[in-house]
Image (cartoon, rainbow, N blue to C red):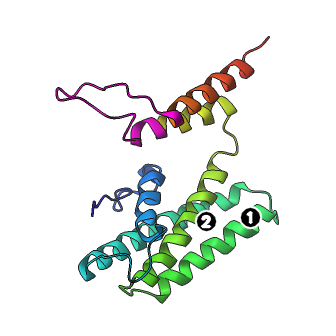
Amino acid sequence: MTHRTAQVMDQAEGDRDAPDLMVMRETALIALTPDATPDALALAPDQVATLTATLRGHVEVLAPDVDRLLATLPKNSPQQFCARACVGEARGKLRAGPADSMEYARKLARVLVALCNHYEQMRDRDETPEAAALRHLSEHSASCRTCTAVDGQGVNVNAQCETGDLLYEEWRAARRSSRPH
C-alpha cells in the first residue's frame, strides 16, 4: 500500500500549505472500493492499522480547516449547517477511535470524503469559472496515469485521455466565455 501524507503537520498554522485533497481522496478510496467488504478486501492487520492511522491523520488535518472556512459562509445558511454537522461528525469519529478495523476505516473514509467536498465548495466559492476549470485540468493532469505516462527515456508519451480532453475543452470554453466580446 502506498503511504503518503497530505501535508506536514508540524508547520506553523499560517505557513501550512493547502491540504492535498487528491491524496486524501485516494486514501479514502482504498477503504471505500466497491468490493471493500470484510471478506473481499484482503488487507493484512498491519495494513489496516496503517490505513486507519492515515485516515485519522487526514481527518485531523482537514476538520479544523473546514471549521475555519465556516466563517466565510453566511450565518445560518444550509451549507454552513451541513459543513458544521460534518465537522462534528468527524470529531465524533476521532473520539470513537482508534480501532484498527476496516469498519472503522470506512467510517473515517466516508467522513473524510464529505470534509473534502465541503472544503472544496467553500474554497472555490470566489473562484472564477476559468480558474476552476484550469485547476480541475491541472489536478487531473498531474494525477492521471494516462496523462503522466512516459516512455523508456522518461518522455511523456502524450497518450489520449478522454477525461483530460474533456477538461481541456471545458477550460477553453470557460476562457472564451470570460473574455469581453
Of residues 78 and 33, the one nearer the viewer is: 33
Q: Residue 150: where, in percent of width, then height?
A: 27, 31
Q: Quadrant of the C terminus?
A: top right
The answer to which image quadrant residue 153 occupies is: top left
* Horizontal and vertical percent position of residue 140: 47, 39
**Left of 25 or right of it: where is 122?**
right
Q: Which residue is mark 2?
A: 67
Q: Is residue 132 above or below residue 60?
A: above
Residue at left 38%, top 77%? Answer: 40
Image side of residue 54 versus residue 46, left or right = right
Name the residue carrying label 1: 80
Number of residues whose C-alpha sits closer than 10 Å to that of mark 2, classed few (under 14), some (14–19) or many (20 or more):
some
Relative image position of residue 109 (x, y in whole percent)? 49, 71
Q: Which residues are magenta?
A: 139-162
Q: Residue furthest top?
A: 181
Q: Which comes sooner in the sequence, label 2 or label 1?
A: 2
* Distance from the alpha carbon under mark 2 to that under mark 1: 10 Å
Choose between 121 and 147: the one closer to the eye.
Answer: 147
